[in-house]
Image (tube, rainbow, N blue to C red):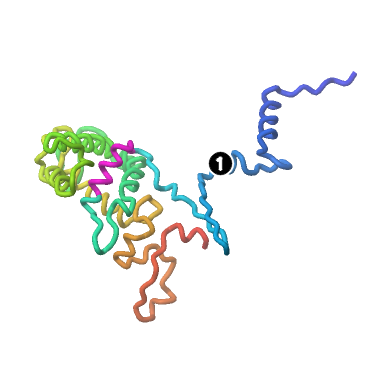
Amino acid sequence: MVEENKENPESVSRRNFIRNAGFTVGGLAVGGIIGSLIPRKQKETTDTKNTQTKTEDFNQALMYFTPEQFKVIEAATERIFPEDDNGPGAKALGVAYFIDHQLAGYWGFNGREYMQAPFYPGEKVQGYQGRLKRREIFDIAIREMQNHSMAVYKKDFTELNGDEQDAILKDFEEDKVNVTTISPSGFFQMLRSVTLEGAYSDPLYGGNLNMDGWKMKNYPGSQMAYSDIIDKDFKKIAPQSLKSHMNH
């Protein structure tokens, strides 16, 4: 008598799902679930000559902030690094996204710093010496910015005009805000520093969109080498991001 080949119902069910869903052809995974792991959304526009495909920048997405927090930081950074005749400001450069991404990573929870007690007030040259992580400082500061804005102007920070927003930020810079959990001036200095970092960092990290921050300063970015121009007259070159080296 030939013994019937009995398979594990779970493995059969899984194989049927994969086959029926069209994920495999000849044992090779194609499209479907594999393709969905690559976050792409394309918009195609067709003219009489050719078809152009535009891929959205998925680096411009929130990883830590709530939408409300993001709007406050976006407005605040634009006042610190405003658009002018020289080029775009923090908003157009995506600085708030840069800050959001940093808070979602090591920088946000001080992952590479010693954060154990005891905690003592440090000297100015020592920098921050507290127990709160940067993401916690931002959470508190954004809430207090809203509270201070409501107390002074009866409006949310994002509803204020530019001069009013400057006044709120100035109160933080000069420690005129009654906050006990964080240093208002310490937060302002942190926000100012990370705003500049977002404006001039590699676009790979979410800010400096289209390398426009570098273009304003004629900064070449991340070049592979200068050997072909180093012994020649000065030449203005287009900046390169770290991403450009992926093709080398």
The percent coordinates of residue 110 (x first, y second) are: 30, 40
Residue 48: image quadrant is bottom right
Relative horizontal placement of residue 209, taking residue 7 as reference (left or right): left
Q: Residue at the spot x=23%, y=46% of the render? A: 76
- Pick the residue in front: 38 or 40: 40
- Pick the residue in front: 106 or 139: 139
- Which portion, as a residue range, is magenta? 65-77
- Secondary structure of the magenta portion, mostly? helix
Which quarter of the image is occupied by the N terminus? top right
Q: Residue at the spot x=38%, y=71% of the render? A: 237
Residue most extreme to the front: 48
Residue most extreme to the right: 1
Determine whether 67 is above or below 53 in the image.
above
Q: Residue at the spot x=30%, y=64% of the render? A: 216
Relative horizontal placement of residue 188, taking residue 41 as reference (left or right): left
Q: What residue type is labelled 1?
A: Ser
Q: Can residue 131 be seen in this view?
A: no
